[in-house]
């Protein structure tokens, strides 16, 4: 017998219209890019780990589902939708088949836990945002440093765990990859070996993993040149971690408030994580006040003070996270000055974002495939656009807040990979935004 699946109504879009300046208070969700390595770290630890403030975006749901397929329980405490306890199952499961790992970039974070549980990790090549070639060759160098063997295929890769070895693992990364840094940390955890990693990535998402491991007994030292990790004398029996608030969601909401000339409080993200974004806002004449976990944005008076912005995505400590660039670009379109943007980390980002902004009438000059220049203020006009990746989607929503007429945004599955409900948060601040299911 054959069965026919009737597809659900997938053609939904978000409609945005210009409205009054955004005001009020909104709280961001836990961060996707912090939750993904923390979930993998919980699995690598091998004991029950309670995680709080887990965001409900689809990438994190996929990651939790991958763990469940691979020999871990994900137990949801009753009445606590954003908490989960991750613990290994008692029975050794058969080698997992994980095709959904191809949907998300961060499935690579599971390799160390899979090596510990199954002696090998067999995964499809990772997916995620299509923002240019996104290699993972440094991850394989990391595993090689631990003695593991990698076999690369057309549709995926296999890493085989080394026989038990002892002693410190030392390696220097050729560039500061966040993914490879986390891979090294988690492989050190599952092998119980001390690690000395040169030229590490020190983005907040890496520092959260270090904080979590420190809370579980690891000794950690993080400097610009060297990151060191040593195991505790005895393995922890349990741990409890909190996923930090989403700095990218907070930064996107800050750009949204600023673009409407509004004034609002954005709670939940750590002020330190927003430093580079706040510096860019100040350059654009937007005043902000940063407290421990609240960013107050006031764009009512200062917008005429805008100076030319140079926003360059960087992997260096304290650099501008590439994920802040798209919403900043949407904001800069409305502000005086000639503003420059560069993202050489993700060489396909501008190829996604610029054509969509152009549909709204933006005039942006491509200096090279990864650099562009625009002069504001520009008047945009609403039309149908597509979230071709997460941050392109959120930037288009920011642009739609001041574009004349109606902007309709499709490709919501991309947006929801990163944010459980960004339109809802904009609505809380008074945006004229709704989801439409034709
Ligand atoms: C799940 C997650 O946290 N994703 C973030 C992570 O992505 P991503 O995992 O791509 O970040 P990395 O810092 O590891 O890599 C940056 C770039 O370096 C290249 N590379 C990386 C590793 C490697 O082994 N070989 C290689 O060539 C890739 O082109 C990659 O795009 O950091 C990016 C840069 O800050 C952010 O935009 C992403 O949101
Ligand atoms: C690029 C991103 O995600 P990923 O690396 O998971 O594709 C992002 O979070 O914007």
Image: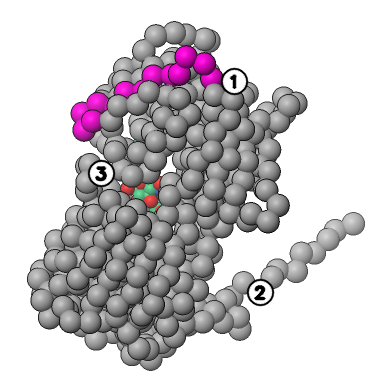
Residue at (37, 89) in percent of width and height: 19
- Category of crowding for the residue at label 2, using alpha-carbon neighbours closer than 10 angstroms: few (below 14), some (14–19), many (at least 20): few
Label 2's element?
loop
Question: What's drawn in magenta, residue-wise?
Answer: 223-235
Label 1's element?
loop
**320 vs 136, nearest the viewer:** 320
Determine the CA span between mark 2 and mark 3: 40 Å
| Residue farthest to the front, as pictured | 291
Residue at (68, 43) in percent of width and height: 75
**344 vs 189, nearest the viewer:** 189
Q: Is residue 395 left or right of residue 158?
A: left
Q: Quadrant of the N terminus?
A: bottom right
What secondary structure is the magenta-colored segment mainly? loop
* Residue 54 visible in the displayed image: yes
Q: Is residue 347 magenta?
A: no
**309 vs 9, nearest the viewer:** 309
Lower position in the chain sequence, tag 2 or tag 3:
2
Residue on which disc 3 sits: 315
Q: Which mark is residue 119?
A: 1
The answer to which quarter of the image holds residue 120 is top right
Q: Is residue 227 magenta?
A: yes
The image shows residue 164 at horizontal and vertical percentages of: 52, 10
Q: Quadrant of the C terminus?
A: bottom right
The image shows residue 289 at horizontal and vertical percentages of: 24, 65
Q: Is mark 3 within 8 Å of ligand 1?
A: yes
Determine the CA span between mark 1 and mark 3: 32 Å
Label 3's element?
loop
């Amino acid at each position: 017998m054959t069965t026919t699946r009737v597809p659900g109504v997938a053609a939904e879009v978000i409609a945005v219209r210009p409205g009054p300046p955004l005001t009020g208070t909104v709280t961001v969700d836990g961060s996707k890019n912090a939750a993904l390595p923390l979930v993998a770290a919980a699995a690598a630890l091998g004991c029950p780990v309670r995680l709080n403030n887990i965001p409900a975006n689809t990438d994190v749901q996929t990651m939790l589902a991958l763990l469940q397929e691979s020999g871990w329980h994900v137990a949801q405490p009753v009445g606590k939708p954003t908490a989960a306890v991750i613990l290994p199952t008692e029975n050794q499961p058969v080698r997992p088949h994980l095709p959904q790992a191809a949907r998300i970039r961060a499935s690579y974070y599971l390799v160390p836990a899979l090596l510990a549980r199954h002696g090998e990790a067999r995964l499809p090549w990772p997916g995620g945002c299509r923002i240019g070639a996104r290699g993972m060759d440094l991850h394989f160098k990391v595993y090689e440093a631990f003695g593991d063997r990698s076999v690369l295929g057309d549709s995926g890769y296999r890493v085989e765990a080394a026989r038990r070895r002892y002693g410190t693992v030392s390696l220097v990364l050729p560039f500061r990859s966040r993914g490879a840094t986390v891979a090294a940390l988690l492989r050190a955890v599952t092998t119980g070996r001390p690690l000395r990693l040169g030229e590490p990535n020190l983005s907040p998402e890496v520092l959260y993993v270090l904080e979590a491991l420190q809370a579980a007994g690891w000794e950690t030292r993080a400097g610009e040149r060297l990151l060191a990790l040593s195991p505790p004398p005895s393995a922890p029996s349990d741990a409890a971690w909190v996923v930090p608030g989403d700095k990218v969601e907070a930064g996107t909401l800050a750009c949204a408030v600023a673009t409407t000339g509004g004034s609002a409080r954005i709670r939940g993200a750590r002020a330190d994580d927003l430093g580079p974004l706040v510096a860019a806002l100040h350059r654009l004449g937007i005043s902000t006040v940063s407290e421990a976990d609240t960013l107050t944005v006031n764009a009512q008076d200062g917008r005429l003070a805008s100076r030319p912005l140079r926003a360059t995505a960087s992997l260096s400590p304290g650099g501008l996270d590439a994920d802040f660039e798209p919403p900043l670009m949407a904001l800069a379109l409305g502000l005086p000055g000639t503003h420059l943007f560069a993202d050489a980390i993700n060489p396909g980002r501008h190829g996604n974002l610029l054509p969509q902004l152009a549909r709204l009438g933006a005039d942006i000059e491509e200096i090279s495939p990864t650099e562009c220049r625009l002069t504001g203020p520009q008047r945009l006009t609403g039309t149908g656009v597509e979230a071709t990746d997460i941050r392109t989607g959120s930037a288009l929503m920011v642009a739609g807040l001041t574009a004349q007429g109606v902007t309709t945004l499709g490709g919501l599955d991309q947006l929801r990979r990163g944010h459980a409900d960004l339109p809802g948060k904009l609505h809380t601040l008074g945006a004229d935004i709704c989801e439409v299911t034709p």
